[in-house]
Amino acid sequence: MSVEWRGKYIEVRKTGSWEYAARLGNGGAAVVLALTDAGEIVLVEQFRVPHGARSIELPAGLIGDTDAADTAPAAAARELHEETGFAAAHWQLLGDFATSPGMSAEMFTLFRATGLTRTGPGGGVGGEDIAVHVVSLADLPAFLAAQRARGLIIDCRLVMALGLV
């Protein structure tokens, strides 16, 4: 493996003829499938530079971006609270998954969070400008279609997580 290019947060690696991206000094991401007792899913909306558009996503964040001793469960709880203003009474580990196995070395750990309580405003930190959406699971297909019609993109992790509700 050789490093073809390195930036502040990512690098492009080459193994044989295969090139792929990898994050520097990161333990992956924690992603949260947050479900209310009323049968709703908690989603976030935020601008994503690579696509030049806002995106509908599950709450998520990097593991270890603020503390090298960070863990996936701690990152999941922190990101759920920071991004959505919810805390969860119950957590279930759903497993580790590859984000885009042909393009990136990035992995994420998916959690199901239930027993939600609103404990803050959400919206993220440091100017993240995150909008929170609490959507009935029954209304989710129509909600996503409406967001697409507005020009938003849909994160593939959300689609994958729907099979785990």
Image (cartoon, rainbow, N blue to C red):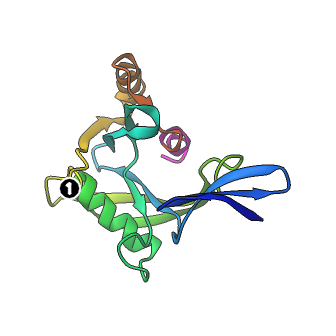
Whole-percent x and y of residue 148?
41, 21
Tag 1 secondary structure:
loop
Residue, disc 1? 85
Q: Residue at x 45, y 76 (%)?
A: 71
Please name whichever residue, 77 or 127, is drawn nearer the observer in this view of the structure. 127
Let me know if residue 61 is in the magenta part: no
Residue 41 falls left or right of residue 154: left
How many numbered circles does the render carry? 1
Residue 117 against residue 73 in the figure, above or below: above
Question: Is residue 65 found left or right of 26 in the rendered image?
Answer: left
Disc 1 crowd rating (10 Å Cα; few below 14, some 14-19, many 20+) is: some
Front residue (pair 96, 139): 96
Q: Main structural element of the magenta stretch: helix, strand or loop? A: helix
Q: Nearer the viewer, residue 18 or 144?
A: 18
x and y percent of residue 48 in the render?
39, 40
Q: Quadrant of residue 43?
A: top left
Residue at 71% x, 46% y: name it. Answer: 102
Residue 89 seen in the current view: no
Residue 15 place in picture, x, y as percent: 80, 58
Q: Is residue 160 magenta?
A: yes
Residue with the most extreme right position: 16
Q: Position of residue 79 (x, y in %)?
A: 32, 61
Kind of residue at disc 1: Gly
Question: In the image, what residue occupies the spot 40% across and 59% down?
Answer: 61
Q: Is residue 8 visible?
A: yes
Report the quarter where the N terminus lies: bottom right
Determine the image quadrant of residue 132: top left
Residue at screen point 38% across, 68% down: 75
Residue bounds of the magenta highlight? 158-165
